[in-house]
Image (tube, helix red, strand yellow):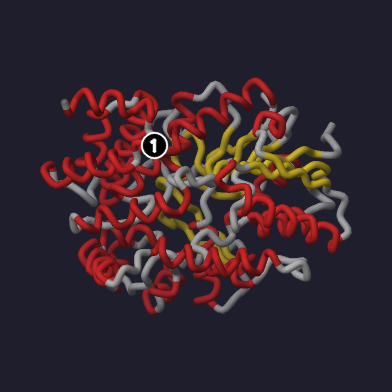
Amino acid sequence: MKKIGLKLVIIGGGSSYTPEFIEGLIKRHKELPVKELWLVDIADGQEKLNIVGNLSKRMVKEAGVPININITLDRQKALKDADFVATQIRVGLLQARAKDEAMPLSYEFIGQETNGAGGLLKGLRTVPVILNIANEMSELCPNAWLINFTNPTGMLTEALARYSKHRKFIGLCNVPIGMERGLADILQIDSSRIRIDFAGLNHMVYGFNIFVDGIDKTKEVIDQYIKKSDSINMKNITAMEWDADFIKALQLIPCPYHKYYYKTRDMLNDELENYKLGKTRAEKVMETEKELFNLYKDESLKEKPKQLETRGGAYYSDAACNLISSIYNDKGDLQVVNTFNQGTLQDFSWDEIVEITCKITKDGPIPHKFIDKLPVYVSGLVKQIKQFEILGAEAAVEGNYNKALLAMITNPLISDDNKGHKLLDEMLRVNKRFLPKFFDEFDNIKK
């Protein structure tokens, strides 16, 4: 029997994305009866937590739904007897993101918060925190599902798979949803009419079969996509057209993050131009955040503002609400998540994490098997990123400098043992506050 009156916890509740989460809960309240919603954050984020919490209360009151919203810095109190826990945290706040982007660019490498050097350092900071949350859940709410959409999602979910005592977790990303919406716009149809079979890794996922009204239209849609390939993008990635002949040869829909790997020189040159003008993506996000929180403070505001969609993670929260509802209601619908491979793709072991279309049930995701293995022309790159995720997770857990060095230099966006080594050392020193376990070994190695 389904439980009535759910307790949902959002860790990182002071995030600017939270109003979208609230909107998602409001519109699904008949099918997802959340009674208690706990917004949790850290002391450094208390001001934003209070602002977002008050807006959330106004939204719920305006909608007339019986959700009791609690605001707290006490994570363990919030987790007690929770049914679902969502994590949307940023260790080091946006200031750390700015360094993740700027420091690689100073070495003329891609500066991006979830790919390359920036993704590694964000992972090193965040993996221990996610594991602490999961281990607290194993004691305080052992039956709760952890829905993580903190980046780098692939590395964090891999870390949960390898090291967490809590075994009910799913990684989530908004990229597949954005790709489906983008293709729907190209075809000038409602997004509910299109579905794509996805497989790969987080920010390294490909669209395979494309269905319109349940009919396979892959070839026709790819032909249309080639003409407007720059229109499928993320707010945090510069829009660039794909080479038409490359897409014809690939016969897959690459995700926007693939541009860092297939269009590295163009993306790097674009980032370097902005970097020289002092305009990394983090600075732009800080400006957007300032605008959003000024809006959120307005006591007459009782709904999610349209400006929130200018953030790169738009639709994350709505995707999370959809996933939670499907688990709770045992819907068996298809959604794209990060979960155990479970023998689906021969490229990976059973317990490695992949991002793939899954059937969502009350017992969790079941990968939808539509291919046996990835095409040879993409599998090498995907496997290289999987090794990067594994090394990054191991380095974070063990405080292992050598594994961090291997992760840095073998990442295809670095591939330079001299400059990559120097960059790692510099980025570690800047992040010392967030890497206490890690730094003892680093200091000994550098003596």
In this orientation, which residue lies closer to the viewer: 263 or 295?
A: 295
Q: Residues within 10 Å of mark 1 (few under 14, many from 20)?
A: few
In the rendered image, residue 101, in percent from the top left (x then y), is placed at 33, 56
- Please, which residue is most extreme toward the left here? 418
Secondary structure under tag 1 reads: helix
- The three-letter amino acid code for the residue at tag 1 is Arg
Q: In this rendering, would 111 be left or right of 355?
A: left
Task: Specify the quadrant of the image occupied by residue 346.
Answer: top left
In the rendered image, residue 17, in percent from the top left (x then y), is placed at 60, 57
In the rendered image, residue 62, in percent from the top left (x then y), is placed at 84, 63
In the rendered image, residue 11, in percent from the top left (x then y), is placed at 62, 41
Q: Quadrant of the N terminus?
A: top right
Q: In this rendering, would 419 be left or right of 247?
A: left
Q: Quadrant of the C terminus?
A: top left
Q: Is residue 183 visible?
A: yes
Numbered-mark total? 1
Which residue is at a point 58% across and 65% down the rendered structure image? 194
Q: Is residue 347 visible?
A: no
Write down the residue under mark 1. 433
Vertical placement of 243 versus 31: above or below?
below
Vertical placement of 28 versus 190: above or below?
above
Which residue is at a point 40% across and 49% down the rendered structure image? 96
Which residue is at a point 40% across and 47% down the rendered structure image? 200
